[in-house]
Amino acid sequence: MPALLQAARLWGAANAGLLWAGRWLAVGCLGLMVVIILVQVVARYVLNNALPWPDEAARFFMLWMTGLMAPTALRRGGFVAIDMLVLMLPRVVASVLMLGLLAVSGMVLVVAAQLGWAEVTGFGGSFKTASLMTFFTIDFADGVPFVRVDWGWQPMPRSHMMASLMVGVWLMLTVTGELMLRQIITMMGHGDALTDIPENATVGAE
C-alpha cells in the first residue's frame, strides 16, 4: 500500500503540474482569441475591410484552449455526469462501478489518442492553412523521436491545429490513469491518505 500511495502522489503531482501549465496556456489562447475576434469586428464593421486571417486564427486558439482545458475538467469532475446510481449503491459496489467506468473511458481515450496521432501524422495534417503563417513547423510524420522542425516563415500546416486534439486526449488519458489508481486505493480503504484534488469551481446541479 505505501508503494501505491507514493505512486498516486507522484502521478498526481505530475498531472497537477502539467495541467497548471495547460490552464495558463489556455487562458492565453482565450485572450488571444478575444483580441483577434475584436480586430476582425473593427476591420469588418468600422473599416469595411474584412481581414482574411482572424477567423482561422481564432479557431486555432479555440481548439487549443479546448484541448488544454478538457483534462483539468476531467480531473476536477467538471464534465456532465449522472451520479444518481452511484450515490444509491453501497460504497464498495459504487467504487467497483466507478473503476469500471474509468476503465471504459480509458479504452475510449486510447482509441482517440491513436486517431489523434493518425490525424497529425497523416495525409490531412500535411495540408496548409489558407491564411495563417508560422515561423516554424513541426513535422511528426517520421514519428517520435524523429520529429523534424523546419524554420522560416511559411504557411501553417493543419497538423498544428489537429495536435490540439492529440495533446488533449493524451493528457486526459494520464488523468484517467491517475483517477483509476486513486479509485483502487479508495476501494482498499485508504482513500483518506490521498491528497485531495481541487473541486470544480463551476456551478452544477444538485
Image (cartoon, rainbow, N blue to C red):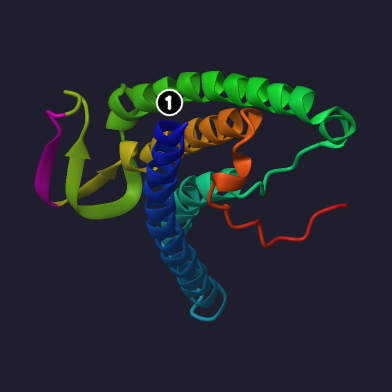
User: For this view, does 150 lie left or right of residue 87?
Assistant: left
Q: Amino acid at mark 1?
A: Ala
Majority secondary structure of magenta residues: strand
Provide the residue span drawn in magenta: 145-152
Q: Is residue 54 above or below residue 188?
A: below
Image coords of residue 14 (percent x, y): 37, 47
* Residue 161 vertical placement versus 104 (above, below): below
Task: Residue at 15% x, 33% y: name it.
Answer: 147
Q: Residues within 10 Å of mark 1 (few under 14, many from 20)?
A: many
Which residue is more in the foreground, 92 or 198? Answer: 92
Label 1: element kind: helix
Which residue is situated farthest in the bottom direction here?
46
Q: Position of residue 195 (x, y in %)?
A: 53, 51
Q: Is residue 97 magenta?
A: no
The residue located at (9%, 49%) in the rendering is 151
In the rendered structure, the answer to whether residue 24 lies left or right of residue 86 reads left
**Can residue 40 be seen here?**
yes
Determine which residue is flagged by label 1.
113
| Above or below 199: residue 116 | above
**Residue located 84% across and 28% down the image:** 90
Q: Report x, y in % for residue 71.
A: 51, 44
Total label count?
1
Q: Looking at this view, is 166 or 37 the one in front? A: 166
Residue 199 x %, y %: 65, 56
